[in-house]
Image: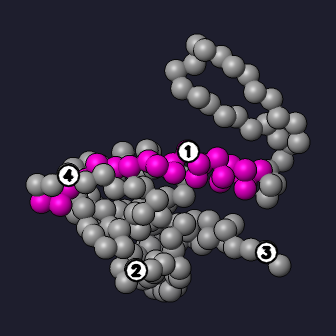
Amino acid sequence: MKINIDVDDSLQQDMITIHCREITDEILELQRLLSNKQTGGQKISAYIDDTEYYVEVKTILFMEADGNYISIHTGKSIYRIRQKLYELEEMLPRYFLRVSKSTIVNTELISSIKKNITGASEISFRNATKKAYASRNYIKALLEIMDEKRIKR
C-alpha cells in the first residue's frame, strides 16, 4: 500500500481520500479506524428539562423521533433535542444507521437482534436494558452492516 500526504493550505477542512483497485477488508478496516478517530470526541448538545448536556456521540445507543423532538438514548439517560431526524442522520458517523422511519441506532453498540418476520425486529444494546426496533423495510440493511462487523472464519 502506498501512502501520500499532500499539504494544501487552501482547503477549508482536512480531507482524506482512499484510492483503491477494489474494496477489501483492509480498506474497510482503514475507513472504520479513520471514522472512529474522527468522531472520538464528537459531542451533541442535548437537554434534560432545562439543563444542557454535551453527550458523546459514541455513547448514544439510539435516537428516535418523538413529536417535534428527538429523544437521544444512552445507557443511563434520555436527552431531547429539537431537530429533524434526517438532519442528524446526515451529521452522524457512518456507524449510525436508520432502522425505521423514526429511529437511528448506533451499530457499534448492538449486542443482539431478535428477528421477527412479520413485524419489527428487536435490537438490544451492550450494557443496557433499552431496546430499539427495526422495521421490515430497514432490517436487511442492518443485518448486512452487522455481518460486515462479524469476524469471518
Q: Nearer the viewer, mark 3 or mark 2?
A: 2
Q: Earlier in the sequence, mark 3 or mark 2?
A: 2
Query: Against 36, is 98 above or below?
Result: below
Q: Nearer the viewer, mark 3 or mark 1?
A: 1
Spot occupied by residue 77 in the image (x, y as percentages of width and height): 27, 70
- The numbered mark at residue 152 is 3
In magenta, the rendered stretch is 27-49
Question: Which amino acid type is shown beneath numbered disc 3?
Answer: Lys
* Labelled pair 1, 2 in contact (Cβ < 8 Å): no
Q: Which residue is mark 1?
A: 38
C-alpha gap between disc 3 and disc 1: 26 Å
The residue tagged with tag 2: helix, strand or loop?
A: loop
Residue found at x 51% / y 51%:
40
> Counting other residues with Cα less than 10 Å from the Cα at mark 2, is it few (<14), some (14-19), or many (20 or more)?
some
Residue found at x 59% / y 48%:
37
Spot occupied by residue 68 in the image (x, y as percentages of width and height): 18, 54
C-alpha gap between disc 4 and disc 1: 24 Å
